[in-house]
Image (spheres, rainbow, N blue to C red):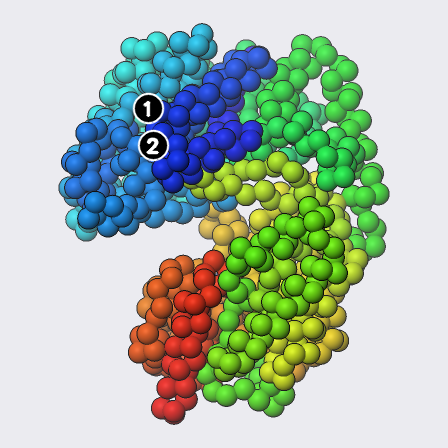
Amino acid sequence: MQTNVLGYPRIGSQRELKKACEAYWAGKMSLEKLQLTARQLRRQNWETLQQAGIDLIPSNDFSLYDQVLDMCLMTGVIPARFQLLMSSLASASSPELYFAMARGYQKNGLDITAMEMTKWFDTNYHYLVPEFDASQQFRVLSTKCVDEFKEARSLGIHTKPVLLGPVSFLLLGKIKDEGLHAAALLEQLLPVYTQLLQQLQQAGATWVQIDEPCLVLDLTAEQRSFYQYAYTKIKAAAPSLQLLLATYFGSLQENTALALELPVQALHIDLVRAPEQLDAVLKNFPADNQLSLGVVNGRNIWKNDYTQSLQLVSKAAGAIGLQRLLLATSCSLLHTPYDLELEKDEQVLTPQIKGWMAFARQKVQELTALKAILDGNEALLEANRKSLHEKSIASIVHKPAVKARVAALTVADATRLRPFPARQKVQEKILQLPLFPTTTIGSFPQTEEIRKLRADLKKGNITTAQYDTAIRKAIVDAVQWQEGLRLDVLVHGEFERNDMVEYFGEQLEGFVFTQNGWVQSYGSRCVKPPVIYGDVQRSQPMTVAWSSYAQSLTRKPMKGMLTGPVTILQWSFVRDDQPRSETTLQIALAIRDEVKDLENAGIKVIQVDEPAIREGLPLRKADWETYLEWAVKAFRVSVSCVKDETQIHTHMCYSEFNDIIDHIAAMDADVITIETSRSQMDLLEAFAAFRYPNEIGPGVYDIHSPRVPTIHEMTELLEKAVQLLPARNIWVNPDCGLKTRKWPETEQALRNMVAAAQNMRAAV
Ligand code: GLN
Ligand code: ZN
């Protein structure tokens, strides 16, 4: 039985790639030096996997920015707006074109916007969306997959090149010209794929991994037919390659038969996310093929449960024989941090919790350990059982009081006292806000000074008292400034927060942080998600002191500012020993305690941000309902403890609500603020069609750009909004928080925004 790794993290154990790319972009590093860094990182990864004894070692899983962008270059999928730049460059494989597509280009009289970025399935990784337009000539512009295969070979390492498969590549992209059809595009794309595969064959490749994660999605009949068509062509063109078709992030379900029919030599399935699919796959498994069992989780940081993995392996072995199996990671290890051994500070990560974890390097060792156990190494299995057992009874993980509290939740706990119309009346009386009330989403510009303050506190360069004084001063300034601008509902500015999830994770029980647990989010951007290891509970108020201090400075309402339970879950590494819904409800109760304390401290408006609700949607539509039900329940649990007169806000920064509007309404927030400026309020139509009953703040300007919007354009947007929704329900606010902006532009923009609101008031 062979071991198979689908992909390895590529940013470098010390984020070398991030640093090198950023230095190169800033003109502080030569291209040669950047390429040298990249070669060193590839070599380290290959050697790590070789030394660990892995049989199928991936290549071309490395990328300077993104593997989908690499595929665009390998197939000539260059959007028309880059043609001019391309023709001005000596070579199309120049990194200048590559990075321009990723990041946009403003140089030499050209101003080209970057390609769009979106989330890679249900991960927090973002890929660049291929754009298919009529002007494109599909051709091999870069031979990256062949070059990297040869590079490894010259180091004496035989690798398995990894390519994003043609059908997923096509389906993940966007067709830009009407009249262009996917089938016709596939027809043009396939010769390029077959050329690449033929070159790999000539270079001596044996196994090639072709990723087709779209096989775990709901597909149309036409999309399914693409698979048959494409793989028959590919097979004929490179007959001596052994193709390993990789699926991950879900179950094949009704696409199982399709996947089993394709002319490939091996199929990979994700048995972490969908262990139940094994039976169906085994039932009709083709006689000569191999099956790659994804048993080691590529999406999490927990130790593998060997007992459970081996059960799956023996079931498969019983059906098709051990020698036809590959032991594999569930997906690429791109989504896990590098190496647990780099976590040296026992104050940060205690040896006990560390003992339960595995990062990419450890997961690779788990594959070889599983193989060793099958060869008779009982001790490895025993040690794993012992560790998992310890965790299952550890008192830092399991808190009976927390579990009991979740179990005791009733419908009333998730329901406000009276329905919205009654609450609206009392809130109007208490808050005395004008029509078209103005507010902001929470954060204000995070200056160098503010960042330094937090860093100095962390390093111990300043005392807590010094820190508090400085943050208080920032709050005083922000409050006076907002009063000067005549905003109606104020915020304290979130100066004490580095990140909207980390800030709460650091104060909640059941969370732990790593020093070096970085994973790639996109390009050179990496994130270090908190780890939820145990039952979550709040031991003391987290935001009350700051919010009440801010409220003491003004007679206007000060918004309390919290992050919602789904968002906290979604942006963390989660437990694998209980359902996500259970963990989310625990977080919801902790937030609920905070909401109650804020109310008791005299805070009359409380915002609970849930920007991640939409991105948590399952990949299959059939699973949406269940998810949305518990997600909405968690939000409601976190806010429904307040009196009618306390106004609950929520905020979401995205602009697709059509398909989930009923659930958004079911959250029953008194006010929701959303992003709309970039869609020219079109999005409000969904709310209007639904007759959305509660109050709503459609963002009137885009905070992603330093551009100052005019009074006129914001007034126009608001006029559009009153066409669609009752004026009484409309708030005036930006699209999102302002922390990435600078003060001067923020001041101008908000001044104009308040003027636009005044225009609206004057008009009614
Ligand atoms: N309150 C947060 C802020 O203003 C909301 C951020 C978000 O929606 N992503 O920064
Ligand atoms: Zn937002």
The one nearer the camera, 334 or 407, is: 334
Question: In this picture, is 691 found above or below 221?
Answer: below
Quadrant housing the C terminus: bottom left
Q: Position of residue 447 (x, y in %)?
A: 52, 58
The one nearer the camera, 263 or 674, is: 674
Query: Where residue 615 is drawn, which disc sits there?
Result: none
Question: In this picture, is 277 found above or below 316?
Answer: below
Q: Position of residue 528 (x, y in %)?
A: 58, 42
Judged from the image, the secondary structure of the residue bearing numbered disc 1 is helix
Residue where numbered disc 1 is placed: 144
Q: CA distance from mark 1 to mark 2?
A: 8 Å
- Residue shown at 53% from the left, 51% from the top: 616
Q: Is residue 587 visible?
A: yes
Dot 2 alpha-carbon crowd within 10 angstroms: few under 14, some 14 to 19, many 20 or more = many
- Residue shown at 21% from the left, 48% from the top: 110
Judged from the image, the secondary structure of the residue bearing numbered disc 2 is helix
Res 310 → quadrant: top right
Q: Position of residue 154 (x, y in %)?
A: 40, 9
Q: Is residue 256 left or right of residue 89?
A: right
Q: Is residue 118 left or right of residue 330?
A: left
The one nearer the camera, 764 or 583, is: 764
**Residue type pointed to by label 1:** Lys
Pick out the residue farthest to the top. 156
- Residue shown at 33% from the left, 18% from the top: 147
Question: In this picture, is 674 found above or below 353?
Answer: below
**Residue type pointed to by label 2:** Asp
| Upstream in sequence: badge 1 or badge 2 | 2
